[in-house]
Image (cartoon, rainbow, N blue to C red):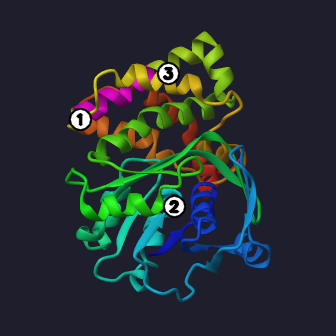
Amino acid sequence: MRIVIVGAGGAGGYFGARWAQAGLDVTLVARGGHVAAIQASGLRIESPLGSATVRVRAVQAGEAVEPADVIVVATKCWQLEGAIETLGPLLHGSTMVFGIQNGVEAAEVLARSVDPSNVLGGTCRIISYVHEPGVVRHLGIEPVVAFGELSGGVSPRAADLESALDLGATVKATASGDIVAEIWKKFLFFAPVSGVGSVARAPIGVLRAQPETHRLLTSAVREVHAVALAAGVDLPPGSVEDTLAFIDSIPAAGTSSLQRDFEDGRRTELEALAGAVRRIGERYRVPTPVHDFVYAALLPLERRAHGAVEW
């Protein structure tokens, strides 16, 4: 099975390195000095589950790569459209393609340009980031990648993919019978934690400890839950309570990729997170006051990163 990871950042780099470490045929597609460092010295994974330097093939975006059996698109949400333009030469008739972005719209975007029969839904859970070129640091949360048919059920190809990609402790791979619900389960915690954390500029342990930000987090989770139900997502009973319990389990020093991008002055996934909650909420007439506030408060920083405003 030939696997191509498009986007070798914190998530894509971690999963790709672990699969290569296990002997799978993996190619990482990325840009800049990160690729050069991997080519020169391998990809270093620093993790509480065991650190390692892994020799894995890495190429610059646009370089020729053989067609793949599986393509995992691990770019930022705002990079997805550009990444799709590079997928054509990587596809054959039965290639499986899925994204592991933080939002809820990746599969829909992929299916606009890739044959929908090739597209799976996908998501992941991990706190990791590129510490320096050639080094991915995993801070916490059990590394999980889930995928499945958007129509529901566990197909033979998804079951085979689970068998190939599941490594146990270092990568838990799951073929989901309801991947749409799995994607929204992540969104249920990630959009609130990333938004409130970015506004407060504080790690998750501080957000939990302060009554005011804890109330914001709780309200934000309830908003996403209401939007999901209005959109017809089959979330299980107790999803809000389970999500709040999961937030309590995140390492206290944890911060979201959205928050780190804001701190570094980079373009962010604001539109795919708080922006998506607002858009979908408006579509189904569900009020989202916390996410409206988060979006409005962070929008000037996002526009500054685009060069649209200056100060």
**Magenta-colored stretch includes residue 221:** yes
Q: Position of residue 147 (x, y in %)?
A: 37, 54
Viewer-side residue, 90 vs 33: 90
Q: Nearer the viewer, residue 203 or 165?
A: 165
| Residue 93 in sight in this render | yes
Q: Quadrant of the N terminus?
A: bottom left
Is 147 in the magenta? Answer: no
Q: Main structural element of the magenta stretch: helix, strand or loop?
A: helix
- Which residue is at 51% across, 19% downward? 216
Q: Position of residue 100 (x, y in %)?
A: 46, 55
Pick whichever of labels 3 and 2 is earlier in the sequence: 2
The CA span between labels 3 and 2 is: 27 Å
Above or below residue 68? Residue 152 is above
Look at label 2 and name its amino acid. Answer: Ala
Q: Amino acid at mark 1?
A: Asp
Neighbours of disc 1 within 10 Å: few (<14), some (14-19), many (20+): some
Q: Position of residue 85 (x, y in %)?
A: 43, 77
Query: Which labelled disc corresponds to residue 245?
Result: 3
Closer to the chain start, of discs 1 and 3, is 1
Sooner in the amino-acid sequence: mark 1 or mark 2: 2
Relative depth, front residue between 179 and 226 = 179
Q: Which region shows up in magenta?
A: 219-229
Residue at image coords 47%, 19%:
218
Amino acid under disc 3: Ala
Q: Residue beneath label 2, please?
A: 74
Residue 234 is labelled as 1
* Label 3 vs label 2, nearer the camera: 3
